[in-house]
Image: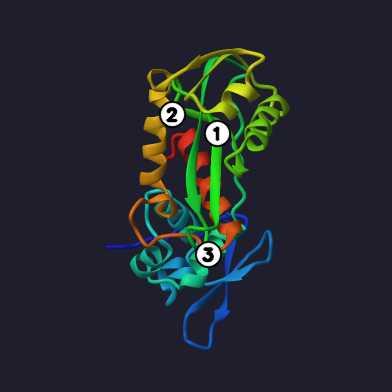
Amino acid sequence: MKITLQIKCPTCLSNNIKRNGIKVDGKQNHQCKDCKRQFIGDHALSYQGCNSGITGKILHLMVRGNGVRDIAEVERISIGKVLRTLSESIYQIQPKQSNYECLEVDELWTFVGNKKNKQWLIYAYHRESGEIVAYVWGKRDLATVQRLKARLKKLGVQYARIASDPWDSFITAFQCCKQVIGKFFTVGIEGNNCRIRHRIRRGFRRSCNFSKKLENHFKAFDLTFFYLNNGFV
């Protein structure tokens, strides 16, 4: 039986590969003829943190409710590799439509470091498509809600009406458009809050899981919202 391994460059994904000597540990070295990158094939790696597919695995595990240490243990990689992958990730959601019949808005409480350092997520949600349209971080006040409204305007999003709970800040910020107030009209976004808390380890209730760095906290939510909106999870 003959086994054939297809080797691609981990940088440019080119198949134009040549052998380039033997490493001191006896492993075959390869070089990409296109970008000149030298590397060892995934099948011969001792440390899985160098595997060409590990970044995708780490990100996917993160949006399935796994913590940093869980991922490091399961994939047999360092905690630093997991954190570095998160910190280097750049994801931004973009609205899939320019006009929405109704957007639901709500707030979600999280914290970084300790429960005194509250980080409020205030966002707009479209129930029919399950899309998180826009979101902002800040205090639980009128100024943060107004930033959400400004964010929607900047993205070119128009809406016929806004659904929210009876919080004064929502009513005041969106008083120029038609509003429907009450829990009956925010069933969709309340359910999405539950989905978020099941997808992001940092959002779990009654657990010891939380972010130590504000940047990593925001990036974890950026990643998850991008994956949710695009159907990756």
Which residue is disc 2 drawn over? 189
**Residue bearing mark 3:** 212
- Name the quadrant of the N terminus: bottom left
Q: Residue 29, relative to residue 23: is it above or below?
A: above
Q: Secondary structure at mark 1?
A: strand
Q: Are marks 1 and 2 in contact (CB under 8 Å)?
A: yes
Instruction: Say which residue appears at 48% left-offset and 45% top-offset.
Output: 109
- Residue flagged by tag 3: what amino acid is it? Lys
Q: Nearer the viewer, residue 20 or 147?
A: 147
- The answer to the question of whether label 3 and label 2 lie on touching residues, with beta carbons closer than 8 A, is no
**Pointer 3 local density, CA inside 10 Å: few below 14, some 14–19, many at least 20:** few
Determine which quarter of the picture holds residue 142: top right
Badge 1 is on which residue?
123
Classify 53 as above or below 100: below
Residue at the image point whose x is 59% and y is 20% from the top: 97
In this orientation, does residue 71 appear?
yes
Query: Which quadrant of the view contains residue 15?
Result: bottom right
Q: Relative to residue 67, is residue 76 depicted above or below?
A: below
Spatial distance from mark 1 to mark 3, Cα to Cα? 23 Å
